[in-house]
Amino acid sequence: MTVTKKTECEVIVITSGKGGVGKTTTTASLGAALALKGKRTLVVDADIGLRNLDVIMGLENRIVFNLVDVAKGACKSSQAIIKSKRSNNLYLLPASQTDDKDVVSEEEIRLAIDQFRREFHFVLIDSPAGIEQGFRNACAAADSAIIVATPEVASIRDADRVVGLLAAKGIEPRLIINRLDAEMVRRGDMLSVEDVQDILGIELVGVIERDEAVIIAANTGEPVVYNHKSRAGEAFSRIASRVCGEPIPIPRIGETSLWGRLSRRLGI
Amino acid sequence: MFAALKRLFGTKGPIAANEEASKGVAKSRLHFVLVQDRTGLTTEEMAEFKQELINVINRFFDIHSDALDVSYKRDTGMTTLLINSPVLVRRRPGVDEAPTKNKERPIKPVTVNLTTAVTKEVSSATDAGSPIQRAKKSVGDDVDTEALAAEITSTKVTDGKIVD
């Protein structure tokens, strides 16, 4: 089904360097949020051998073919994608669980992803952690990148390295800060949004606060954006709007009002 | 009551305590680590680089050798090597402004900023050669290696007088 011209599709790689900072959650939630806005979206799990996007999307029992099959020509591209449970606009291309990351080349991945450009407005690629072949494969077809980082020393250091590697590929990344804790920022025990932006020096596209709802969403296999009471879910919706070009301002987190500061100083 | 007022206006209140809180430590550690990661210099090479800079600057200015700071700052699209060296500029007796009632006027440090613009990231660790060679390779003819050494902007010194 041809929905878009080839040039209208944006392929975005979601990467981080550091593992466990929220790439898969971001891919699933941002994908779901874009689908809710009416954009046909494909989320791709490029973590060959360690697949997880299927579990976060709740589609783990519907997998027949995967990214490696498409790359090797073992199946048609339309056979491998799985429609999500909640939205007709959202599809998943899962990773293979039995291969490792060297089984496909960058060129094979690029050709595989390019096949989907006519059918989708957005293709989000969930990159594995690290900077080796898996990362390079994930970036092969990408038009742009989003780096996910938490406000912690190790995560920022790795993200910085990835910014450099992406720049060398000619990709200017944007930043999502994940798991910000407003109270810790206020106390001075966590780097603030401004600190992280200042250090990494790339455009900020969103901030997500620590939220239990994210873990609960992973338990049930429903992307957190469907939970209207969740602040993380709302943050992902706003990010989706910004990705679509809408100028939604980023809420300031971790700063108190004058009264808040006064009462804290007085110890009341 | 006074204790509360003191906390409100005092210098050792909770807000000042935040400066010593762990985020400050994190920032300075990251600063140290990222300069190395971004420039590709080892700890020894960085120490050597700083010492050579200190030697050059010392020939023309009095310098706080401990306070020399090298950082590699990134802004969208551009990366800058920033060298900050607080320099002591003494007033010359009889030439600069007349002595005030304090005979021993404290020496005012003037910061001299050496800024070099490197417009592309040095690509991944497979590049061989010295950092200057690597930088030249990635940036190409845009960079003159001599110009790489300095564009000294002396701030806030006009007509031989120190202006704040």
Image: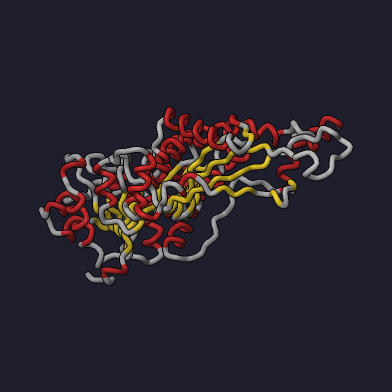
Q: Out of B33 and A156, give the one closest to the viewer.
A: B33
The residue shown at (12%, 55%) is: A75
Rendered location of residue A117, percent (x, y): 25, 64
Tell me if I can see residue A211 in this picture. no
Residue A154, image quadrant? top left
Residue lying at the far left of the rendered structure = A74
Q: Out of B60 and A254, give the one closest to the viewer.
A: B60
Residue lying at the far right of the rendered structure = B101
Residue B90, image quadrant? top right
Rendered location of residue A176, percent (x, y): 45, 50
What colour scheme does the image use? secondary structure
Rendered location of residue A238, percent (x, y): 48, 58
The residue shown at (55%, 45%) is: B114
Residue A266 drawn above or below residue A33:
above
* Residue A140 falls left or right of residue B88: left
Quadrant where the N terminus of chain A is found in the figure: bottom left
Rendered location of residue A145, percent (x, y): 36, 54
Quadrant where the C terminus of chain A is found in the figure: top right
* Residue A215 falls left or right of residue B18: left
Residue lying at the far top of the rendered structure = B44
Residue A3 drawn above or below residue A13:
below
Q: Out of B29 and A80, give the one closest to the viewer.
A: B29
The residue shown at (69%, 39%) is: B89
Residue lying at the far front of the rendered structure = B94
Tell me if I can see residue A214 in this picture. yes
